[in-house]
Amino acid sequence: MVELTSSEINPPQSESNVAFGMQVVMTATSGNGEQLAALMLQASELVAPLKGCKLYLVQLSTSAQDSALITEVWESKEDHAASLSVPAVQEIISRARPLIADMAHHTGIPLGGHGI
């Protein structure tokens, strides 16, 4: 198992500050939706303690077969980008790539709401 360094861990925050959000729809190759969602759940566990990660929600779509829905909220776009360079995250990405048939990203600015 890959360990995270102390510089990658999210320090305690006294106030919520979010500036980057993303909705991702990942469509898996036929029959691989649950396997892809399971890998994204592993990714969620890896990014949760990283600097700037406020939310990483994984859902299995009930309206689109073999699709995983990912909702991410970060303090900054830079924090999100930095998470992609963590070796353990890169390893999950390399395991997920062969399962992905299509992927759509929608970025946004989180305005608030329950859970953020």
Image (cartoon, rainbow, N blue to C red):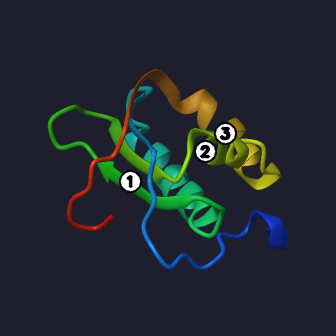
Which amino acid is tagged 3?
Answer: Ala
Pointers 1 and 3 in contact (C-beta within 8 Å): no
Instruction: Please name the residue shown 24% across and 42% down the image.
Output: 61
Q: Is residue 114 left or right of residue 99?
A: left
Residue 1 visible somewhere in the drawing? no
The crowd level at tag 2 (other Cα within 10 Å; few <14, some 14-19, many 20+) is many
Q: CA distance from mark 3 to mark 2?
A: 4 Å
Residue position for label 3 = 81
Q: Are marks 3 and 2 in contact (CB under 8 Å)?
A: yes
Which residue corresponds to mark 2?
80
Q: Label 2 to label 1, Cα distance in Å? A: 16 Å
Dot 1: what SS?
A: strand
**2 w.r.t. 20: above or below:** below
Q: Which numbered marker is on residue 35?
A: none
User: Relative to 66, is 50 on the left or the right?
Assistant: right
Q: Quadrant of the C terminus?
A: bottom left
The answer to whether residue 60 is left or right of residue 24 is left
Query: What is the spatial separation of the Cα atoms under label 1 and label 3, in whole angstroms?
Result: 19 Å
Q: Amino acid at mark 1?
A: Val
Residue displayed at 60% across by 38% down: 96
Judge the density around disc 3: few (<14), some (14-19), many (≥20) Cα neighbours within 10 Å: few
- Residue drawn where x is 68% and y is 49% of the image: 83
Q: Which residue is mark 1?
A: 58
Q: Are marks 2 and 1 in contact (CB under 8 Å)?
A: no
Front residue of 76 and 54: 76
Q: Is residue 33 above or below residue 17?
A: above
